[in-house]
Each structure stands twice: as structure tokens, then as C-alpha cells.
Amino acid sequence: MIDVAVIGAGVSGAYAAWRLLGPESEGSSMLEDLRRRRRGPLAVSLFESSGRVGGRLFSVTPPGMPHMHAELGGMRYLSSHPVVADLVDHLGLPSVPFPVDEPKNLAYLRQRRFTLPQFADPNVVPYDLPAAIRGNTPDEALLSVIERFFPNAASMDHQAWDKVKATATADGRKLYDVGFWNLLLDAVGQEGWKFLDDGFGYGAVVANVNGIEAMEASVADFVGSPPPNYLLLRDGYQTMPEELVRRFVAEGGSVHLHHQVRRIDRETVDGEEVLRLTLSVWPAGQTLTVRARHVILAMPQRSIELLDPDSFLFSSDQFLSDLGSIIPRPASKLFLGYDRPWWEDLGLRAGRSVTDLPLRQVYYWGVEGDQTGADPANRNALLLASYNDISDVEFWNELLPQPNRLAPVAQTRPPRPMDAVAPGALVEEAQRQLRELHGPDARIPDPTVAYFQDWVQDPYGAAYHFWQVGAKSWEVMPRMRHPLPDANLYVCGSAWSTGQGWVYGALTQAELMLEEHFRLARPTWLSPSAYLGS
């Protein structure tokens, strides 16, 4: 019998496990009761179905570039993100600025190539835009639409958005009950919507999701004032969950990789209600039973759906409704390494270029010799050659060899890290599109290494999630943190948060769950003014 089983060693699971055993867990009356019952230290175990810690934080170091890290999952955070910035400082993880839109970077839309500042010139931008957004960048255009509903939107923080979500309306309809695509179409027409869709580089930004949640996410992540200040962990984002797990183990916690939970049942042991976990252990394939007084599911939507349908939590209609209150969003990344930073010949050094080609976004990641502690003579360079989402993911999946295409993970084998080198056909097509994007002056050599990652495959099911039209996030989130009032079972992660697709969404929900249901005090390293949400 263990006290707490944490399922999933992504960042939310790693954080929850560490907080339960860390030095700042002292003083929790609930944890003290568990220790007295055990007559010893708290027993907390972290179970992970794959062979690695990190979940959708997945940092790969290419050969010949020891100071460079291809971020195949989450890659950045904002200095204003609740919990994240304070946790980075507390853990001593070095960070560096992450530039995005640099003046010399390119837009290649409708076969017209121009620099980002030229968005201000209606004669250059190949869209017949309404007067209200003509001469605007995509960021400015989107913000102007949102400000029709909230004139001070640019300066609204998460707490301000939470105050208006339940009541804000458009034409007599609650904004949470209206699709964002519909709102944008009414505001700027089809041509204006297409300009936003193409110019942002993210199809998800203007998709038909929950209107009020989309407005908050757009302002917080992209178009707020002052502009977002993005940061990158110098040694890879995966170092965050790895460091949390290292500290968790140092405090006496146990980690079990290749342990996949199949079902969860209630059981009574010596008069005590506990939860029985049935796990598959790889590679041997044997079945293991673990009993726990409390279970934390630090898992995304699809991973929960893959549990045995007879698991008791699926008997709750409310839980099933809340489980389906979010939409899975596909996204994929392609990193290419080169023996030199060919883009510098074009005056491009950092940030991104955007296109309506299936590449969608290209980030000039960096040069090995320019990194702290690296050999200046090493000019090996890394490019995020494609960062795409929604329908563009399908384009690249069709270029994968048949065995690697999108398919459910068989229940007879464990999920595997998807870190295979990208296949030739996919790389060849990416190279062709890079030449088209950058123009005839680009001299692009063959890549030395390639990595492709598609997060739609099970057990992840999505790169991130977003709220369905009609979902009341302020009601769903606290319910999901403790979905069954009569069971010691909890859920945390970014999927049901107002920071979907961001580490801060995962950490804020984990912290709120620990404070509410394990009675942990707010950690001293976390700013007292940090607003963690509903």
C-alpha cells in the first residue's frame, strides 16, 4: 500500500510528486495524518508509461551540437507566466531570451514574399482587407477585433478575464457560447479571417473554439501590451521535469518507468477505502497491481480515455461531460540541422518567418558556436524548419513511412518516444518549401540531421487542447481537480486549464489541486501575488 500514486511523469506529474515530498510539504495536516498512519515517511510513487521523464517536454541534443537542443514539444515560456518563472529561478535553471518576430524576418503569403514590417503597407500585403484592419500586422488586427468587445483587452491579465467570462456577451449571446471563427468572420469577413489564419502561422488561433477563452489566450500569449517576453531554458525544457524528479527521488520518492496504468478500481482494505491500479509493466508485459490511498492522474484527455472503460470513474456522467469539454489540437515539428547557418547569408539571425505553405512557421534556432561555453569555430546550426498545426499536420503525416503514420498504439505494447529521425521524403519536401519561402538567393545545403515529432499519436492524442464552445471553464477546472467527491482521485495538467498548451497551465492546476485537496501551503518561492486561476 502506498500513500499517493502519481500517474504520468510529464511536468504536472513531476511537480505534484516533488511538492508532496519536498521540504515545503511540511505542515499539511492531511499529509501528517498519512505519515502517522504509516508510522514513517510518506510513500509516494510516480508511474510513467514511457521510458523517459518529461511527457510533451522533449528536448533532443543533435550530434555535433552539444549546446543546442531541439525542442520537439513545449519550447518556451513568458516571464509573466504564473509559477513557471518563479520555479525556474527556484530550481536554478538557466534561461535565455527567445526572439520571435524580428524586423528582417519574412512573410511568404499567397506567393508574395516581404519582410514583417511591410505588413503595414496595404500595397504589399496580398489580401483585400476591410478598412478597419488594413495596414495592420496580424497581431494588431486580432487585437483590434478583441478590443471591440473589451476596449482595455491589451492590458487585461488572467484575473481580469476570469471576472468577465461568465457574463460577457455578443449580440445577446454569452461569448463562451460563441465560436471564435464565427466572431472573427462577422468582424472582418472571410478575407480578413484568412489573413489572420495565414499571417499568424497558427491555424488554432482563429479556429472555432470557445470565444471568450480564445480572446484571453490570444491576448495573453501573442497580442497583449506590452508584447510577450518569451524565454527558453538554455539546457532544454525537459530539464525542468527531470530536475523535479531528481529532487523527488532525493526526498525518498520512487519512479517507475514503463509502467502503464490500464484501469482503476475501488477496493476496501482493512476497512479503508483505497484505489486499486492495474498496470502493464514493459518490456516483460506482466501485470502489476498497486493499491494507493490517493491517486493523481497527471494525464491528458486521450491518456485518460485509454483506461479500461470499466474503470469506475467512467460511471460518472459529470466526469464524462467534463472530460469532453476540451478539443484535442494536433501539431507537429520538424527540426533540421546543417553544417552552417545558411539563413545568415540572407540577413536572418533569429526569430521566425511565417508562410501559408504547410511549413507555416520557421524558427532560426541558433548556431552551436554562438552558445555559452561552445567552440566558436563550430558553425553547425539548427533550424525549426516547420512548426505547424491543425490541417497542416496531415500534410506531413502523409510523407511518413506507412508504419509510422497516425495509428492508435496497440494495447499489447507500451507507448514509445517518437524521436525517430525524419524520413527522406518528408525532409525533401521541407527543403523544397524552405527554398520557396526564402527565395532564389537562398543556398540551402542538405541537412545533417532531422527530427520529426507528431503529438497526435497515442497516448498523447494531441499537442495541446482548447475549450469547446459552450464550456464553462471556471466550473469545469475545479471539478476536474477532484472529479468524484467520494473518491481520493485527482486530475491535473494543462488540458483543463486557462493555460492550455503552456507549462504554466499544467503547473497552476497541479498547485491548486495540491493546495485544495492535500492542504499544502503556497510555497515560499512562489510570488504571493501570483494569480493561479479558478
Image (cartoon, rainbow, N blue to C red):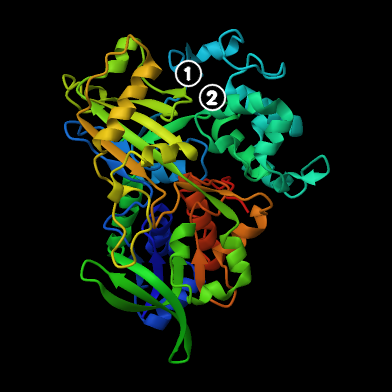
Q: Amino acid type of disc 1? A: Ala
Report the residue marked by disc 1: 107
Residue 408 can be seen in this image: yes
Question: Horizontal and vertical percent for residue 436?
Answer: 38, 18
The one nearer the camera, 89 or 270, is 270
Helix or strand or loop: what does disc 2 sit on? Answer: helix
Under mark 2, the amino acid is Gly
Q: Say which of 180 and 373 sits in front.
A: 180
Apparent side of residue 249 relative to residue 108 in the rendered image (left or right)? left
Q: Residue furthest bottom?
A: 270
Callout 1: few (<14), some (14-19), or many (20+) C-alpha neighbours within 10 Å?
many
Q: Are marks 1 and 2 in contact (CB under 8 Å)?
A: yes
Residue, x 56% and y 67% (percent of image)? 482
Q: Residue at x 43, y 13 (%)?
A: 104
Q: Report how far apart the C-alphas of labels 1 and 2 lie in the structure.
A: 8 Å
Q: Position of residue 99 (x, y in %)?
A: 42, 25
Q: What is the x, y in percent for residue 298?
A: 44, 60
Indicate left or right for 362 with 120 as reference.
left
Which residue has dot 2 on it?
Answer: 199
In the figure, residue 274 lies in which quadrant?
Answer: bottom left
Q: Is residue 406 above or below residue 440?
A: below
Q: Quadrant of the C terminus?
A: bottom right
Secondary element at tag 1: strand
Instruction: Pick whichever, 434 or 177, lies toward us.
Output: 434
Front residue of 347/152: it is: 347
What residue is at 48 percent from the left and 12 percent from the top?
Answer: 114
